[in-house]
Amino acid sequence: MTDLARPPARAIDPATVPGWGVDADRRNDPTYPMRHREEGGRPMDWERPPLQDPQVEVLCSIEHNRLPAVVGTSTPPRGLSGAIRRAAFAYSESDWRHWLMLLGADRVNMVEGLAEDLARGHIPDIPGEMGLRAEWRHNRTGLVRKAAVAVAVVSVAALLWPRAERGRSRHARRLHH
């Protein structure tokens, strides 16, 4: 579409937009006492809090040149999931690979946690950790519905699997003859 074919932009009348200018009256500003505002001055004057000195590796987005004042240090990246997270932070936050890799790292981390539990001799309570007991207690019909859908999907997959295998084996026999 060329610029000539575009319709002219329609001006917005602020009076027709609900909530327009709601923050214009300083007496109605819930942050007023905290923001010591002055006419013509900066909207907010504050001193940056002292930076936390993390004692573990903290991953930082490539969009930011420094860490925030406070960072989470309870679960530093480690193992295969940590390597996937480090690789994800090589990409921009606007890149889908960054987020898919972080989602994958979460799943790998879950498996790593299960392996650690089993290595320590602790058998994880997977139904309890998934919240099945609470769901049975508080949302029984929803849980039964989810279970029925899961059984139906697995049943259909099991019925279709042998047909797919037969079709592949016939195709393989044809290729060998």
Image (tube, rainbow, N blue to C red):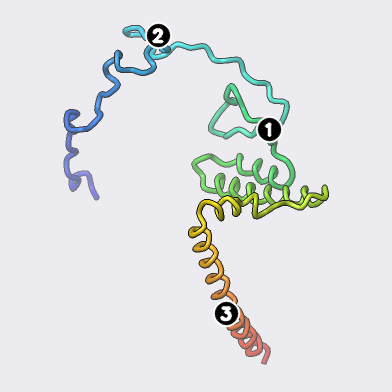
Across and down, in percent, residue 85 comes to 64, 43
| Disc with the residue nearer the chain's start (3 vs 1) | 1
Is 71 positioned to the left or the right of 27 in the image? right
Residue 8 marker:
none
Asked if 65 appears above or below 119 in the picture, the reply is above
Q: Residue furthest top?
A: 38
Which residue occupies 57% across, 42% down? 91
Q: Secondary structure at mark 1?
A: loop
Instruction: Tell me the kind of residue under disc 3.
Output: Leu
Separation of marks 1 and 2 at Cα, in angstroms: 36 Å
Residue hosting label 3: 159
Residues under labels 3 and 1: Cα distance?
46 Å
Question: In the image, residue 120 lies at what x, y percent?
Answer: 82, 47
Lateral position of residue 40 relative to residue 120, left or right? left
Image quadrant assignment for residue 61: top right
Determine whether the residue tagged by mark 2 lies in a helix, strand or loop. Answer: loop
Q: Quadrant of residue 99?
A: top right
- Residue toward you, 170 or 23: 23
- The residue drawn where x is 42% and y is 13% is 44
Residue, disc 2: 36
Q: Is residue 118 left or right of residue 37?
A: right
**Left of 140 or right of it: where is 52?**
right
**Residue identified by numbered label 1:** 74
